[in-house]
Amino acid sequence: MDQPQYKLSYPQLGSYDIPIRHFVMHGLGEAYVAPPPMTKRTIEIGSQNSPDFVCAPFKCMMGCYIEALEKGANVLVQTGGTCRLGYYGELHEQILKDLGYQFKMLNITIARYHNLLGLYKGMKEIAPKTSLLKVVRALPATAKMVIQIDKTEDYMRQNMGFEKNDGDFERAHKEYLSRLRQAKGLKDVNRAYKWVMETMKQIPIKKPEHPLRVGVIGEYFTIMDPYSNHEIEAKIAKLGAEVHRWMNLSNSVVVCPDRSTIKKLKHYLTYDIRKFPSSIWHKIQVKQAGRYTKFDMGSSAISTIALAEEYAKRGYDGLIHVKSFGCTPEMDAVPVLHNISADYKIPILYLNYDTQTSDTGIETRLEAFYDMIEMRKEVTES
């Protein structure tokens, strides 16, 4: 009996659909259905079919799932999270099946798959054509895509506000992503990255010696998805600021086990994912022993606090705190951010998002914040 043709899909999250698509097609040997770019319709249908009390990321993901199913996807991927998002996969699945959609859910959570071998077995259920060799071969290009996308976008955020010709960086970035979509392996990935960095470094800019520097901190999903946060990074950059954001997949997900633990491939495959060291957990441990908080409040809250203090110590001119409405860990972080702001005399703009947030309101607040930190910098330097 022929196996059914599986078509996998994952919710939109910035530019990361490209490496996900590469891994699905080249590592799992299955078709990939990219949900359409998020629009007002995505948010509307996601909100209509979600409980009122859940956070905006849940509703965004729900809208993406529905649009992917409408395009023909029959396997939905959910990666969970370290807050209540870790339970959202089951809730998404139940709601969508109650709506009458026929599909399989690949819920990749650490609770289900403690190691890479367990994760591979889970993938095998919806990708019977894959093999361990295929997966291993696809991983380097996939990981490299994630890392290089983050490096490219870091460079953009820090320089696009000073370009002489409006839109040069965005055009180069768009072409870069187009080349990545056509990449078949690691050589193509590296070639695309080399091209985009050479191109961006040739873009004429007029950058002051000491530009305004703004750090963006906050909740994991909203901070990384431009549509969800109303493209605040591009907007504040184009006002004339150098924008920095640590939170991305490279820093929070793409981690490697300690060299001493990789003595044999078998050991690597059965190594508990939860023991992987990464810089974010190091920051948590350091910060938990600090004066601002003693306990992990869940999700990205501790990294938000650690990064806020780090940016403040480095003399940044302002911080923007991004979170979705109802995000409890980030709500808990806000009083601590008030203390950091007072101690280091650094202004913080708090942006709270829900599915009703408007572009106009965000732009007005960003412009006022920029004007304030610009005047403050002028007074300080005079």
Image: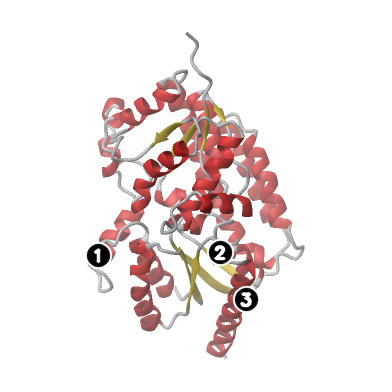
What's the residue type where badge 3 is placed?
Thr
Percent x, y of residue 131: 43, 20
Q: Quadrant of the C terminus?
A: bottom right
Is residue 12 in sight in this rendering? no
Numbered circle sitting on residue 364: 3
Is residue 167 in sight in this rendering? yes
Q: Earlier in the sequence, mark 3 or mark 1?
A: 1
Query: Which residue is the extreme one toward the right?
Result: 165
Callout 3 environment at 10 Å: few (<14), some (14 to 19), or many (20+)? few
Task: Say whether residue 95 is left or right of residue 369.
Answer: left
Numbered circle sitting on residue 356: 2
Residue under pointer 1: 288
Comparing 192 with 38, the one in front is 38
Callout 2 environment at 10 Å: few (<14), some (14 to 19), or many (20+)? few
Q: Secondary structure at mark 1?
A: helix
What's the residue type where badge 2 is placed?
Gln
Q: Earlier in the sequence, mark 2 or mark 1?
A: 1
Q: Are marks 2 and 3 in contact (CB under 8 Å)?
A: no
Task: Say whether residue 95 is left or right of residue 237.
Answer: left
Percent x, y of residue 73: 55, 32
Percent x, y of residue 187: 58, 32
